Image (cartoon, rainbow, N blue to C red):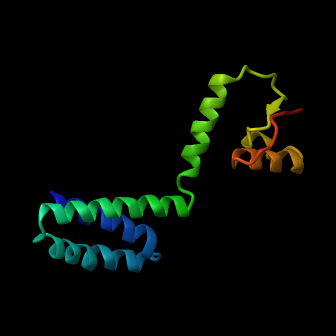
Amino acid sequence: IMPAAFTALAAVYLLWAIAKTLRARLLWMVLGVPVLFAMVVGLSFAANAYLCFSLTLLLAQRAYVVDAHRPLVNWIRTMRANATSPSLPQDIHPLRDSDALTEAGNKAYRLSVMQNAGLPVPGGVVI
């Protein structure tokens, strides 16, 4: 099971980070993935577990670098903000709601983005 898990994780990483074209993806899937499996099938459970753990961390690092985690973080912040704040009238938006402020003024939108990034921006609303 562990060699198959390592091969699956490696395939995800290779297709996500290295193979940019359809041809490269096909070559990695047809040639690279079986070779990777053949290389690790003879290793011990501990070695394969170490490789799987390392690849999991590598995938997490890649997700952080390319901001793949940003939609999840924004969704969690929105859900938390909606749960703790009272509802506002239709044309009044809290400063932390960047999606609703894309059509507002540039200053309001930039302050919202900075606040969501964790910078010390006072809370407020945009009418």
Against 64, residue 76 (above or below) is above
The quarter of the displayed image where residue 101 is located: top right
Residue 17 makes an appearance in the image: yes
Kindly identify the residue that appears in the image at 55 percent across and 63 percent down: 66
Q: Residue at x 70, y 45 (%)?
A: 116
Q: Nearer the viewer, residue 85 or 28?
A: 85
Does the rendering let one see residue 3? no
In the image, taking residue 81 as reference, residue 92 lies left or right, namely right
Quarter of the image where one finds residue 97: top right
Horizontal and vertical percent for residue 88? Answer: 78, 22
Compared with 100, 59 (above or below) is below
Residue placed furthest toward the front: 120
Q: Is residue 6 above or below residue 70?
A: below
- Would you identify the image quadrant in which residue 10 lies? bottom left
8 vs 66, left or right, is: left
**Residue at figure coordinates x 21%, y 78% from the top left:** 35
Residue 21 located left or right of residue 90: left
User: Residue 120's x, y, as percent?
Assistant: 77, 45
Q: Quadrant of the N terminus?
A: bottom left
